[in-house]
Structure formats: C-alpha cells, structure tokens
Image: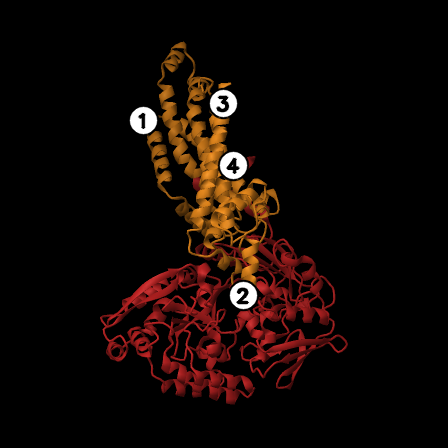
Chain colours: A orange, B red
C-alpha cells in the first residue's frame, strides 16, 4: 500500500512540475521582444491581410493567458501544433528526429556504464598502486574536459587520420545509423565514465573494507569471488542509481553534441528553434525533455527499491 | 557484437579509429569515394555540398535565403537566365523574346519541355506560376510592380507581358527566381505542403528533388527529362548536408567529405587557407555593406550631422578589418565596382568629382558638426544584428573626440527584416533606428538595383528598403526617367546625375562590397557569376580529369 501511495505521490509531482515548467517556458518566451508575427511572416511581405490571417491562425490577438490555455488544451489532447517557420506539424518533426537522440542516449549510457564499472572495479582492486592513480587521474582529467572540446578534437582527429569517415547526413539502415551516432555516443559515454567510474571506485572500496569481506577472506574464498560475488553485488546499487540519473540527464547533453556533429536529433532542433524564435518548437521540446527526465528519474527511484530490498521507499 | 567487445577493451583513441573503420564499411556510397575520385561505387559523379542552414521550402515563393541557391534553384528553370557577366539575359525556357512596344513583351517558350515527372510543360503552367508570384504578399512581388497582366497562347507557345508603364528593368525579371516555373496541378493538389519535406517538388530544371531529411540532408539527382540534355551534366548526384557549425564544415572539407562549401565567412577563412586539393573561388556579386542613417529623425535629419559622422569613419579600415581579404571598399555612390559596367570611366570621373567622406578627417568632421544643428555634439543609437557587432565596435572606436557619442543596440537576426523593410515603424511612419549597420544585395548589376531601392522616395513605405528614409524629388525624377527608356547610354546619364545628388546628401555611409567565397575540391571546376544569386546552377560545374 505504501508502495502504491509513493508511486502516486511521485506521479503527482511529475504532473505539477510539468505544469509549472510549461507555464514558465510559455511566458518567459513571450518576454522576448520579437513578435511571433514577425517570425511567422518571415521574409514575406508583411501585408495587413497576411498579418490578419496569421494572427487568427495562431490566436495572436488573444490575451497571453488565453493563448496559454489554448496551447495547453491542444497539448493535452495530443495536438502539438505547427511551428512558426516551416508551418509543419511539430509531432512529425519530433518523430523524424527522436531516433537519433534516443540512440545517442541509450548507446552512450550502456557503453559508459559498462566501462565505468570495469574501470572503477579495477581501480578499487588495485587501490594505492600506480594503476589506481593512473585511472583516477584519467577520470579526473576526462571529467574536466568539456564535451565540446572533446567533440572538436575528435572531429579534428577523424578529419586528419580517417578521411573516409563520414559523420554527416542522414541514414537509411542500422549500420549507417550506428556510424552516425558512434563517435558522438562515445564522447558522451566518456563524460559518464569520468563520474560513474569514481562512484564505482569509492563504492567498491568501502565494500571491500566491510567486515563481511574480512569474513569471506577468513573463510578462504578466492579473490575474484570476494570481489564479484559479494562486494560488487552491494557496491553496484549506488552506481546504478547514479547511472539512472545520468541517463536521464544525458537527454540534455545531446543538445550540444548534436549541434557539433550536425546530427538530426531533437537537441539540434531545439537550438534551431531558439535561434529562429520558433516558440512552439521550443515550448514542446522543453516539455518533452523535461518529461523524459522526470520519468527516467521516477523509474530509477522505483528500480532502486527493486535492486535493493533493504530500501523502504515509504 | 564484435565491435562491442573491442569497444570495451580499447583505449579512447583506438575506439575512434575502430568506430570509424566500422563506418566506412557500412556507409559505402559517397564516403570513401570522395577521398580519392569524384565517382562513387555506382560510377556516379557525386558532389557533396554543406551549408549551415536549410531552405524553408522548395517553393519559389519561399525562396529568399542564400541556401536556396544550392538546393532549390536547380529543380526549376526560369524563363531566361543571366549571362556569365551578369549584365544581360540569355534564353532558358523562353528560346526567344521581343519587345513589341514600350509596354509589351512577348516570349516564345521552347517546345517539348518536360517536367521532372515526365509530363509536358504547358502554357497554363507558365501563366499560373507567374500570376502566383505577382500577387500581393509574396516577398518579391515588387519586381512585378509595373505588370498589368500576363497572357498565354498554347498554339504558338507565346507568353505576352503587358506592363502598365515603360519599365527598363523588366527585361531582367524573367531571369529572376520568381519566374521559376511550377507544375500547376501538383502545386494546387498539395497546397501548403508543396515544396516542404512532407510534400513533393516538380520542375523542369536540370536536377530533380529526391529526398529531404530535415536539418540533415537533401539529395538531388539528374533530371533525365531536362530539355538541356541530362547527358550534358557533369554531376549526377548532389548530396546537400546541413551542418550547423561553420567550423565543422571546414573540418569536413579538410577531410575530403565535403567537395563544395559556399558562403565562407572571414572568421573561418584561416582553416580553409591551409587546405590541399581545394581551391578558394571568389567573385563579386552585388552585395554592399553600409551604415544607413535615418534622415527622418534627429540627429541625422541634418545633412551636416550625417557628414560629421561619415568623416569620423575610416571606411578603408572597416573594409580591411571586417570585409577582409575578399572585399573592396565602396565609393560614395554605394555601388559596387561591377555595377559601373555600362561605362566604368565615366563613373570614375564622376566619382572623382564627388565629395569623398569615406576617408577619416576629424577636422572636417568638426567643421560639419559646427555647421549642424548640434554644434556641441550629439548622441545616437546604432542598430546592428549580432553578426555586425564587431563592425559597430570598430566604428564606435573611430569617433575620437569630435563630440559624437554612439550607442550600440543589438537586434535579433529574426527581426532583421522588420528593420530592413520598415515593418516596425511608429505611427508617424518613423523607423525605430537612428543608424543601422546594414547591407543590400541589388537585384541586378544594373545600378538601378541600388539607386531605386535604397534612395527612391517610393521605397520609404513599409515593405521597401529605403533604409535611410531619404527623399529628394529631383533624384526621384531622374530615376523615373531612367525607367521610361531602354537606351542604356541615356539611362547611364540619369544614374550619374542622380548619384551626384544622393552622394552629396550622405544618406548612407558606404563601407565595403563583400565577395562571395567558396571552397571547391580541385576535382571540380566552377566559375561564379555576379548574378549567381538568381541563376546558380550545378549544371555549370565540370569535373577535372
């Protein structure tokens, strides 16, 4: 019962946060001096007839609060509306682009988590040796290099040493899809490794020093079994939690990386939307990213209890 | 799965190489090929092009971005084309034409022209396309200002244009993109979807639209039905990539992935300088960069105040620092050198007699300021898009101790058109800026393209680009006379006289004419024309053996 109550409480929180953010985004975009009409008309001749037509079509003559309510109603009924510049349904644009973003997030999270765990365990097992120092310094170094610097270095490297590699354009099959997202995905994973590796290391160290490991040692259990069967099992819980949150947060980091690698995902779409003052796109994408983040975090919370039965979520 | 294991095992540097090796195996066409030869696996000659943005649509009515040149233009044909020098028109869809009288022109349309879907081009399509862009609300309807109506005859394949008054610029209009011919039935059937990435594109041009993944890639292929002969086209397929970051484009060019990168700006030039196997191609079009002074409001309603500011600014220095290597300083006429084509010597003589306020001379600036309504100096707001802030700061630093104070106001790029075309004027019709760091691209090399648009009083209305809001009846009369005659010698006389008046009034402070700069793989050749912005075509590209 406590379980259900907790889930309901979390869901309610998601709804409230989404609602507040939708309001914040909608109204803060309207603080911008640029009139939506200017953006909609673009470089066409701004005749009174055209102004009238678009004003009616986009409800621009309504008070702001009413515009917000109209927009919210549409969103709730599943109609994401059309954008100001291309005047195309936003839903279709998102569907066209979401595979790249999801692909990036999943690929980088899986790759990053696996690498982080391996590196973290290695560092913990070799604690105090040169291997530990080298790995720890490497992780510290990687976590301090901004993603865009690493991306530009990667592109520089590829353009110089792998001239045949094409990181641009669209994809028509899974192989091409993977080739588009592999390098940016690896770069995103590196950011993950840096943080997650250190979490794994410290978590493993504390487990390896725990009394039950001393007991295991005393029982004559071999080193691998000590590490993997017992210590790792307990150490992995905080790691997976952090990984879950980072998975949710990486939706945000696709914005920059998609821009640099010219990937047709929703991050790039958001940047273009902001540059063009294409409010409907910015509003919807901020909500999409927010909801993805909230839902992911929610799932992590639930899973946390599943992985570790000691945790009483009520 | 194999790669996956390797990924886990390897170091970062190794990872990238592995990932990359995996990729060139899977992608095939257009990637490995571009590094060595110009043809891909299927023996097709592919040109890989990159730009930082994509067109709004492939509908000629939306064609107002530079990027349209490299995507949409080749899907359509115009009635006429500009010649390589950009000074005259040559046949295209119309094989011949005739000026019947002052206000009537006839065009004979080629027989046997087919659309990219294999259907025949009818006179009805031509009439429909022209009427469509002549209607109000279309950005370039001003080109058709003096059109009374169009008339077509299917039997003789003749288009007749009736003007309301003589218009010496009409001869160029059939070569402009608003005269790109569409297929009526397709446009009507698709409505608002036409030309978007959800709809289709049908034209008679040398290349046909194949696919468009928004914000990523546009593919064009040879149109086998092209009346000019698909076999005469050196390039079989064009991959146009949208790459948001100009430096990424530079790196892609460096790696050989991109063959053609248009519109290089001076910030990224250093990267291109070090390239091997690439040529930097450049040429002047009709772009000019200047400061527009709002002559309707204080302080620049006073010609002495305008000249005082002009004498503070060293245009040569602005040209060198902002325009860069591929630019030239402008004369007081605000016309680029190639617009003097009718008689360069006559123009140069005339310019030498005009007062040259493009040089920096603080003494003269002080002199004019003392004569002005603001002898103790004045303050003004200089509006600029984000891309012009460096230029604004440079100008600001040039004002010295003359007594003029300049405030920089940055406007959003999305708002540029409101300023340029006066859509944000107040109730009295006054535009909001006092000075505006701006530019203009003339429709033609014909000097009237700048003189009429930037200086004529008729163009102070909203939607028009007399950004200085300057009016002078004597000037207007001379330009109007130039419209009434097709004798270029006579017109030249009016232009020079008009330019003298305008230059003396200093409504604009001329800065520089920028060149268009392209990087092109040495596998290909291309010579840009001053009128590329109307008639750019991949059909002009050749493959070097």
**Residue at disc 4, secondary structure:** helix
Query: Is A196 drawn above or below residue B439 in the view shown?
Result: above
Looking at the picture, do discs 3 and 1 lie on one chain?
yes
Q: Specify the label residue A106 is tagged with.
A: 4
Question: Considering depth in this image, is B89 or B20 the residue closer to the camera?
Answer: B89
Name the residue that disc number 3 marks. Answer: A5
Which chain letter matches label 4? A
In the displayed structure image, the side of residue B308 where residue B134 appears, left or right: right
Query: Is B26 drawn above or below residue B452 in the view shown?
Result: above
Which chain letter matches label 1? A
Which chain letter matches label 3? A
- Circle 4: is it few (<14), some (14-19), or many (20+) Cα within 10 Å? some
Which is more N-terminal, label 2 or label 3?
Answer: 3
Quadrant location of the C terminus of chain A? top left
- Mark 1 and mark 4 residues within 8 Å of each other at the beta carbon: no
Name the residue that disc number 2 marks. Answer: A47
**Residue at disc 1, secondary structure:** loop
């Amino acid at each position: 019962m406590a379980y259900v109550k907790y889930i309901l409480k979390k869901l309610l929180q998601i709804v409230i946060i989404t609602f507040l953010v939708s309001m914040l985004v909608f109204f803060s975009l309207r603080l911008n001096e640029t009139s939506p009409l200017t953006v909609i008309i673009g470089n066409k001749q701004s005749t009174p007839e055209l102004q009238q037509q678009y004003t009616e079509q986009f409800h621009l003559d309504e008070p702001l609060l009413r515009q917000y309510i109209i927009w919210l109603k549409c969103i709730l009924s599943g109609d994401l509306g059309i954008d100001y510049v291309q005047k195309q349904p936003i839903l279709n644009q998102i569907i066209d682009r979401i595979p790249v973003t999801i692909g990036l997030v999943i690929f980088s999270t899986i790759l990053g988590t696996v690498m982080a765990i391996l590196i973290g365990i290695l560092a913990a097992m070799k604690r105090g040796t040169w291997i530990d120092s080298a790995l720890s310094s490497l992780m510290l170094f990687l976590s301090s290099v901004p993603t865009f610097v690493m991306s530009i270095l990667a592109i520089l490297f590829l353009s110089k040493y792998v001239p045949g590699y094409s990181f641009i354009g669209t994809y028509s099959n899974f192989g091409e899809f993977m080739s588009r997202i592999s390098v940016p995905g690896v770069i995103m994973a590196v950011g993950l490794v840096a943080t997650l590796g250190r979490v794994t290391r410290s978590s493993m160290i504390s487990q390896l020093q725990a009394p039950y490991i001393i007991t295991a040692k005393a029982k004559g259990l071999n080193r691998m079994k000590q590490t993997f069967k017992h210590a790792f099992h307990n150490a992995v819980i905080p790691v997976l939690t952090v990984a879950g949150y980072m998975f949710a947060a990486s939706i945000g980091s696709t914005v920059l990386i998609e821009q640099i690698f010219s990937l047709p995902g929703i991050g790039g779409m958001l940047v273009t939307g902001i540059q063009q003052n294409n409010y409907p796109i910015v509003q919807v994408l901020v909500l999409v990213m927010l909801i993805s983040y909230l839902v992911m975090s929610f799932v992590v919370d639930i899973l946390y209890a599943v992985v570790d039965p000691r945790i009483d979520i009520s | 799965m194999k790669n996956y294991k390797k990924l886990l095992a390897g170091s970062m540097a190794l990872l990238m190489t592995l990932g990359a090796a995996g990729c060139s195996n899977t992608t095939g066409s257009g990637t490995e090929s571009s590094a060595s030869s110009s043809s891909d696996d299927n023996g097709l000659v592919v040109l890989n092009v990159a730009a930082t943005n994509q067109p709004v649509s492939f509908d000629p009515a939306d064609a107002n971005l530079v990027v349209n040149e490299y995507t949409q233009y080749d899907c359509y044909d115009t009635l006429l084309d500009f010649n390589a020098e950009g000074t005259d028109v040559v046949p295209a869809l119309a094989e011949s034409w005739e000026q019947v009288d002052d206000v009537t022109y006839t065009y004979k349309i080629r027989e046997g022209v087919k659309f990219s879907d294999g259907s025949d081009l009818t006179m009805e399509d031509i009439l429909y396309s022209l009427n469509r862009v002549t209607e109000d609300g279309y950005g370039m309807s001003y080109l058709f200002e003096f059109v009374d109506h169009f008339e077509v005859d299917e039997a003789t394949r003749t288009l007749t244009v009736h003007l309301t008054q003589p218009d010496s610029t009409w001869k160029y209009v059939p070569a402009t993109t608003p005269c790109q011919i569409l297929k009526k039935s397709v446009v009507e059937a698709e409505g608002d979807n036409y030309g978007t990435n959800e709809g289709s594109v049908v034209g008679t041009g040398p290349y046909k639209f194949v696919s468009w993944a928004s914000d990523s890639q546009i593919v064009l292929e040879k149109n086998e039905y092209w009346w000019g002969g698909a076999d005469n086209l050196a390039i079989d397929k064009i991959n146009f990539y949208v790459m948001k970051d100009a430096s990424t484009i530079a790196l892609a060019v460096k790696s050989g992935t991109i063959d053609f990168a248009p519109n290089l700006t001076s910030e990224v030039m250093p990267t291109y300088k070090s390239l091997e196997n690439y040529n930097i191609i450049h040429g002047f079009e009709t772009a000019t960069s200047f400061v527009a002074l709002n002559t309707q409001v204080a302080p620049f309603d006073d010609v002495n105040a305008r000249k005082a500011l002009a004498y503070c600014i060293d245009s040569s220095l602005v040209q060198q620092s902002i325009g860069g290597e591929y630019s030239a300083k402008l004369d007081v006429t605000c016309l680029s050198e190639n617009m003097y084509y009718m008689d360069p010597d006559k123009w140069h003589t005339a310019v030498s007699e005009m007062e040259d306020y493009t040089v920096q001379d603080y003494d003269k600036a002080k002199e004019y300021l003392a004569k002005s309504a603001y002898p103790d100096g004045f303050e003004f707001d200089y509006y600029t898009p984000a891309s012009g802030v460096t230029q604004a700061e440079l100008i600001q630093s040039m004002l010295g101790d003359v007594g003029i104070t300049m405030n920089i106001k940055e406007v959003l790029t999305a708002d540029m058109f409101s300023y340029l075309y006066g859509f944000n004027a107040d109730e009295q019709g006054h535009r909001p800026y006092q000075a505006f760091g701006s530019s203009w691209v003339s429709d033609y090399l014909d000097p009237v393209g700048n003189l009429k648009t930037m200086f004529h009083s008729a163009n102070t209305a909203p939607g028009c680009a007399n950004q200085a809001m300057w009016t002078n009846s004597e000037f207007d009369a001379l330009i109007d006379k130039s419209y009434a005659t097709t004798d270029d010698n006579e017109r030249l006389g009016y232009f020079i006289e008009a330019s003298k008046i305008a230059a003396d009034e200093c409504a604009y402070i001329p800065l520089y004419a920028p060149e268009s700069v392209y990087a092109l793989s040495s596998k290909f050749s291309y010579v840009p024309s001053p009128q590329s912005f109307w008639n750019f075509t991949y059909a002009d590209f050749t493959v070097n053996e």
